[in-house]
Image (spheres, rainbow, N blue to C red):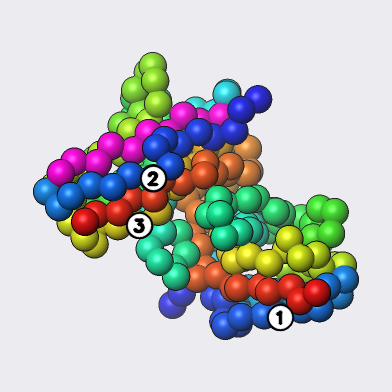
Amino acid sequence: NAGVMQNPRHLVRRRGQEARLRCSPMKGHSHVYWYRQLPEEGLKFMVYLQKENIIDESGMPKERFSAEFPKEGPSILRIQQVVRGDSAAYFCASSPLLDTEAFFGQGTRLTVV
Amino acid sequence: AQKITQTQPGMFVQEKEAVTLDCTYDTSDQSYGLFWYKQPSSGEMIFLIYQGSYDEQNATEGRYSLNFQKARKSANLVISASQLGDSAMYFCAMREGTGANSKLTFGKGITLSVRP
């Protein structure tokens, strides 16, 4: 059973470009969470999704950020018109229904130049 | 108030000794879960141990144990017989509510360095 897969592992974007981060949850997991980690900080919750539904987006910036988890395929975190402050590690985690543990992917490190 | 507090700036331990990493939390929920994750320099987040608020016994996973003191709202991680590979950042996290539909709130983390 493969773990949570995130790609790419490293992503460099120029200011103003779009960044698309992908997350494939563990097999059988239908709950996906995205977190952001700034340097020297803990992880901050961004959004929680189930298949085709956004359940909680209270941690998402109001502009430029969006997330989806389609019926088929990975979950996507999309950042439009990136700025230097978006540089961070973005982690995806998945949980099976009614389980307790959230398993994390290896993260995508976004660098905006 | 912060939900998860990790105040130790950095910890050092001699190889093969035990070390305790502190974590206090703040919640008004009766049902919650506490987690510890390890983040080595390679950056991935590795799940270590989980304690449910209704669990009467302290959780243990190999060399990891969680010293859960509910009245004091503390959930300290104890690592026994430290190894060089234990050098990493350690994060305490809390999930409030039940089921898989609750987000994790993380502390700022503690750096642990194991000396040979």
Residue named by callout 2: A10
Structural distance between the alpha carbons of marks 1 and 3? 27 Å
Residue B100 screen position, x and y as percent: 54, 40
Q: Amino acid at mark 2?
A: His
Q: Seen in the image, is B110 located left or right of residue A89?
A: right
Residue at disc 3, secondary structure:
strand
Please tell me whether mark 2 or mark 3 is closer to you in this view: 2
Q: How many marks?
A: 3
Main SS of the magenta part reads: strand
Residue named by callout 3: A88
Which residues fall within the magenta stretch?
A: A17-26
Q: Is residue B59 magenta?
A: no
Residue at (59%, 73%) from the top-left corner?
A: B110
Q: Seen in the image, is A40 located left or right of residue A13?
A: right
Residue A33 occupies quadrant: top left
Structural distance between the alpha carbons of marks 2 and 3? 10 Å
Q: Is residue A21 magenta?
A: yes
Please tell me whether mark 1 or mark 2 is closer to you in this view: 2
Residue at (63%, 44%) from the top-left corner?
A: A101
Q: Do discs 2 and 3 share a chain?
A: yes
- Residue B12 is labelled as 1
